[in-house]
Image (cartoon, coloured by chain):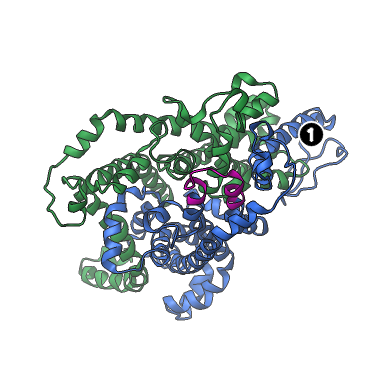
Chain colours: A blue, B green
Amino acid sequence: MTTATTEPAAGAPTGTSGRPVELRPDGGKERFGVARSVRYLGLLLFVVIVMIPVYVLFVTSFKGAGDAAPSRAWSLPQTWTLDNWQTAWTSLSPAILRSLQMVIPAAAISAMLGSLNGFVLARWTFKGANLVFTLILFGMFIPYQAVMIPLTQLVLDLGVPSGIPTLILLHVVYGIPITTLIFRNYYLTLPHELIEAARVDGAGMLRTYWSVVLPISIPSFVVVLIWQFTNAWNDFLFAVFFSSSGNGPVTVALNNLANGALLQNYGVSMAGALFASLPTLVVYIILGKYFVGGLMSGSVKG
Amino acid sequence: MSRDRDLPTGKYLTMLKSLRRAGPPLLMLAPSLILVGVFVYGLIGANFQTSVTDNHTAAQATGREPSLLVWFQNYTDLLGTEAFQHSLTNLVLYTVVFLAGTMIMGFAWAWMLDKPIKGEGIFRSIYLFPMAVSFVASGVVWRWLLNSNQGENASGLNRLFQIVGLDFLQNNWWNNVTFGIIAISIPAIWQLSGYVMALFLAGFRGIPEELREAARMDGASEWKLYRHVLFPQLSPIALSALIIIGHMSLKAFDLIMSISKPANYQTKVPAVDMYVFKSSFDYANAAAVGSILLIIVALVIVPYLIRTNRQEKR
């Protein structure tokens, strides 16, 4: 490994990433802080750029009629008001509740299916398992526009009530590929001996899954649940095809709130956008690590 | 199992054995296989079937009147119209800008964060958070930011450009007929650059320190180190990022719906056309657009899946 050739610079990295902090030869350049300062400035500049929409959302949501002039577009509110928030809450709260009723079962069921599939495809394989996996995986990438027309008919034929029940079904079905992928990739990292030991003890497939694999699957379950929660919560495509603002999730209601009215009230729509984003943002802030885990497995790598 | 296969007499036995072995796992997969089989492959087939009929009216859509087989008429008609060509051009423009933007930003952020720096976690979280927000919600604020008013009436980004003295940057954003779609890719870049950053950062961290060390020992310059050591190591990640962002881009729908509304000619793409056709009960054309999108996506995805599958076997 690296031998440190320089003294640690003042304010040396503290290894927040959990990665061992090493001093590299080019650390000498950084010691004088020029390169580092430039880097900091660059990073901060991008923070400002990324946060611009957030500033606009917050500031506009607290503005009243007195701030309507374009010249005040970027200023803070003259008087801070909660009116927009109240209006947005009144019109969105039923849809937010419906969104919750949709994403919780959808995430739970597709996680269960994904775990079973992932286990079989990673650890209880059979001839052709790889092909089966690839065929399932393809479903993750298809543009849903390519199934939408017959899907409306199929859902009618199956007699699933429109609105939330239909959307739960669709999120479960079209969630199978990604949840299977995440669990499979996780199970592939488990040591061979673990499953072999159970097999040698004469445990069957279900027994092995239930008593050996499932108990150590918690991290993957968290990743998958967050992923499915976020995806289903943020989905607009299925929502706009299979529900209306009267029986649909919050994305449809928000879109109607923002684009439906004749006179566009940005204060109310922005307060609404913040309400609608709150659950996923909270999940992201609290469980960010696992959120990133889901992102990573989104890139198909064995 | 492979030993059994060598014995000629064991052939029947082997079949039985592999059936016994494949039975339980296949049974466990059955619900998912049936669902995916019907909802993905079955419906793709059914969609194609609709796309080769003359099912253009509400009466036909509801089955009150019969639809006739017209083969590829809808496809040739669609591809021949200026409006749909405009959608396809938009799709290409949007995809190119979206891909370039997220790759450049994502790489730059990862590169800046790779070397240890204080507050790395905070920077990472801030760059990544837009990914947790829905396109519909971000569309609300971007619709305001990308307001096309200029001069006295300017709000949004145009007003901001005035404030910081970059007046010449003012433009009419998504109202531009030829390049309006590029304005829509700005929010898309804002939302997904953090994702590409996370991928690249994982890539940087996955490169063994010994590799960099060895190159430095050999007296490689910083540029050569990137060119010959780091870039080759990062290329699989770059490919994954391109595929994922690329296929998202081809399905672009939510942002356009919430920023510029479906009827807007300037920013229409195939996914939006499909919605408009569906809304007017022109099921045949809606299905045809869906199939065209599928073909475009499959051209990118299928080779990638086959390649991944092969790599795993090795």
Quadrant placement of the N terminus of chain A: top right
* Viewer-nearest residue: A2 or B298: B298
Q: Is B225 situated above or below A158?
A: above
- Find numbered disc 1 in the image and state the secondary structure of the residue it sits on: helix
Relative placement, left or right, of A210 versus B62 is right
- Magenta stretch? A256-273
Q: Is A259 situated above or below B20?
A: above
Do we see residue A26 in this rendering? yes
* Viewer-nearest residue: B127 or A232: A232
Q: Which three-letter amino acid code belongs to the residue tagged 1?
A: Gly
* Dominant secondary structure (helix, strand or loop) of the stretch shown in magenta: helix
Image x and y of residue A49, in percent: 66, 35
Q: Is B81 situated above or below A264?
A: above
Image x and y of residue A121, in percent: 41, 63
Do we see residue B230 in this rendering? no
Disc 1: CA contacts within 10 A as few (<14), some (14-19) or many (>=20): many
Looking at the image, the residue that sits furthest to the top is: B168
- Tag 1, which chain? A
Residue at x 24%, y 43% (from the top left corner): B285
Q: Does B92 appear in magenta?
A: no
Q: Does A266 appear in magenta?
A: yes
Relative placement, left or right, of B279 versus B234 is left
Looking at the image, the residue that sits furthest to the front is: A66
Image x and y of residue B124, in percent: 67, 45
To which residue does mark 1 refer?
Answer: A27
Relative placement, left or right, of A102 versus A10 is left
Image x and y of residue A47, in percent: 69, 38
Looking at the image, the residue that sits furthest to the bottom is: A202
Relative placement, left or right, of A40 versus A239 is right
Residue at x 31%, y 56% (from the top left corner): B40
Label count reads: 1
